[in-house]
Amino acid sequence: MRLPIVILTVTLVGVPAPAVAAPTDGLVAAVVARLGPTTQVNVAARSTSRWGFGTAVRPARSVERVYPQGWLFVAKRETGIWRVALEGEAEFATLSADAVILTGDERRTLGAAKVSRRAAATTDRRTGMRLPFAVGQTWRYTGGPHPMNGSVRSSIDMAGGDGRVLAARAGLAYTMCRSGKGWVRVVHDRGFATDYYHLEGNIKVDGKRVAEGAFLGNIGNDVSCGGRSTGKHVHFSLRRDNAYVAIDKYAFGKWVILAAGAAYEGAALHGSKRVAVGGGLYNYGALGLNQGVVDTDGGTTLNKRSGPGIANAVVGKLTDGDTVTITCSARGTRHTGRNSYVTDLWNKLSDGSWVSDAYVWTGTGSPVNGTCT
């Protein structure tokens, strides 16, 4: 005789289910151990039991002219211990290049800083960036170069227009504050990144690729990561090779930012046009890496010649502030431009004419598009 199969279900009252460790168990504690007990840690949802990624912010005190510090971090768990690496550390690039939880785009971008390019920061200030608002709008330049943290004057303040803050260049975007509000960082190519603080209604992102001109948020007074803010604006900061750099003499929207004696003072130059803090900055768009802005150091016109030197015939003229595209460069007669910049470099333009590099701001005193053959 075939016996029936009986399935018994037994419920043990008062006996808890076995504990299941969170995928990132101990990760937050490891980051806090690196940066201090007040650290805001925002772990990416894609983190696992072996790999971790996210943002970490050391909040600022709620006082004026004090700003938070923030990092992307990547971590790897080995023998039960989390190895945490922060932006600016050599291990950050090494781990980022191997972290399987990162996208291929992130591994290429964040892992590209294995070889430092800091030396280039003193000789090549080309960013390929626009101002962080719509091309064709004019915004108020409300604060000259001043810090994001520490003493490096990496940042400027801007307000006005339609209030929409846009990405200065394409890149990978991250929301920094644990609240998801206020602060967005965009990591670009060539070792650059930009920060946008005090935003209201900002996007909430974790490595999303954004295009140049993509909406990031609106100007505001948000201080989710600390500090103080009066008057809605965007606090716009420049980073290079995972650290803040002095924004002085870098160009955005074809304006060269100039620091002055004290923080928050300064000006901006477009050719010979100078706008002090409090004035308006018109967004001309990004200056291409093979382009320059004519700067005659006085507002006069610039002769275009048939070859690299003043012995060659004049074939046309350029107006101060014009944008030129450079096809290649060669050596010619020596000239002196703004700030006693002396050079014998001449640039061949896209129309075949030549101009002295002394009167063209490119961001570097070297050829921007190779040497003419």
Image (tube, helix red, strand yellow):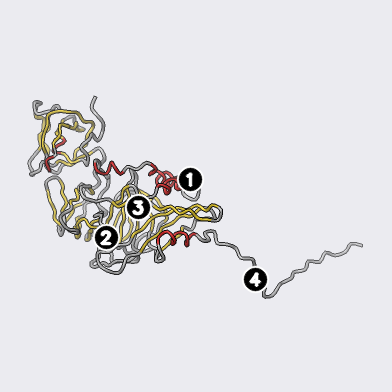
Residue drawn at the location 43% of the way across and 48% of the way down: 91
Which residue is nearer to you in this view: 306 or 126?
126
Amino acid at circle 1: Asp
Instruction: Look at the image and tell me in which quarter the C terminus lies.
Output: top left
Q: Which amino acid is tagged 4?
A: Pro
Task: Nearest to the eye among marks 1 and 2: give it.
Answer: 1
Determine the secondary structure under disc 2. Answer: strand
Pointer 3 or 1: first along the chain: 1
Residue placed under numbered mark 1 in the picture: 98
Location of residue 258 in the rendering, given as x and y in whole percent from the top left corner = 17, 51
Vertical side of 263 occupied by 99: above or below: above
Residue type at the position of mark 2: Val
Other residues around mark 1 within 10 Å, as few (<14) / some (14–19) / many (≥20): some
Q: Which of 211 and 337 is in front in this view?
A: 337
Q: How many marks?
A: 4
Contact (Cβ within 8 Å) of mark 3 with mark 1: no
Q: Distance between the residues labelled 1 and 2?
A: 34 Å
The answer to whether 207 appears left or right of 193 in the picture is right
Can residue 140 be seen in this snapshot?
no
Q: Label 4 crowding class (10 Å Cα cut-off): few <14, some 14-19, many 20+?
A: few
State the CA–CA distance, disc 4 to disc 3: 45 Å
Is 180 positioned to the left or the right of 277 in the image?
right
Badge number at residue 16: 4
How far apart are labels 3 and 1 at the CA level? Answer: 21 Å
- Residue 4's quadrant in the figure? bottom right
Q: Of residues 80 and 273, which is closer to you in this image?
A: 80
Question: Which one is earlier in the sequence, the residue at label 2 or at label 4?
Answer: 4
Q: Quadrant of the N terminus?
A: bottom right
Mark 2, residues whose alpha carbon is within 10 Å: few (<14), some, or many (≥20)?
many
